[in-house]
Amino acid sequence: MNLRYLALGVTIVLAACRIEKPGDVDGQALPAASAATRLPEYLGLGTPATAAILARVDIDVNPAGAGLPAGDGDAARGATTYAAKCASCHGPRGEGQGPYPRLIGAEPRAGFPFGTDASIPKTIGNYWPYATTLYDYVHRAMPFTAPGSLTPGEVYSLVAFLLAENQVIPATAVMNASTLPKVQMPARAHFVLDNRKGGQPFR
């Protein structure tokens, strides 16, 4: 190998791997150890989560109804809220339109053929297993343009409207933290706990 080219290569490598003083990065001195101990405070890390902060994100409602807030609503009030905040996406009668799903429709009333016929629309009336999680979903995700903006009363009323239109509850029923968990959805029996342990039968 030509020694001139070898020397040139070594020079290039040394230039690329510029040696700096220990503790330097790109010519900037790193903070001393005493300053480094203050980094979490400087970066705004480690702030304790207060009860008020947790309350803003602890909004889930489970199938048993734990987490349902105070308030109530009925189908009459829900119809007004639906027309104002939901119909533009889901259609005036919950029939669905464009990419937005159908919400109302209890057919088929017998059986549960969704696993073999993907063309059957899944609605609240024929597929949703828990009335309580309907509250949870509407509360956290709807309306699409302003999720989380509905009051508990508006959500209870929308849930009452959707359940009544799907003929799950009477049109006069009032939904609240006490009554909503008692609603038995038509498809409830078709949803079971997945308690499989693994192994050959499930592969």
Image (cartoon, rainbow, N blue to C red):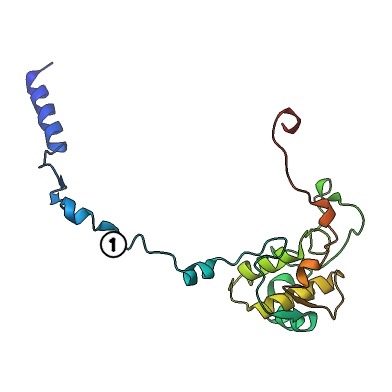
Circle 1 SS class: helix
Quadrant in the picture for the N terminus: top left
Residue farthest to the right? Answer: 110
Eyeballing the image, is 31 above or below 80?
above
Eyeballing the image, is 9 above or below 171?
above
- Residue in the foreground of this view, choosing between 159 and 102: 159
Q: Which quarter of the picture shows residue 88?
A: bottom right
The residue that disc 1 covers is 41
Q: Is residue 194 left or right of residue 171?
A: left
Q: Which quarter of the picture shows residue 187?
A: bottom right
Residue farthest to the top? Answer: 1
Q: Position of residue 161 (x, y in %)?
A: 78, 76
- Residue in the foreground of this view, choosing between 99 and 35: 35
Q: Residue at x 83, y 60 (%)?
A: 126
Q: Which residue is drawn at 69% across and 33% down?
A: 198
Q: Which residue is drawn at 18% across and 56% down?
A: 35
- Residue in the foreground of this view, choosing between 176 and 20: 176
Q: Position of residue 12 (x, y in %)?
A: 13, 33
Give the total of numbered labels: 1
Q: Which amino acid does label 1 sit on?
A: Glu
Quadrant in the picture for the C terminus: top right
Q: Which quarter of the picture shows residue 102?
A: bottom right
Q: Where is residue 105 in the image (x, y as percent from the top left)?
A: 84, 66
Q: Where is residue 117 in the image (x, y as percent from the top left)?
A: 83, 49
- Residue in the foreground of this view, choosing between 90 and 146: 146
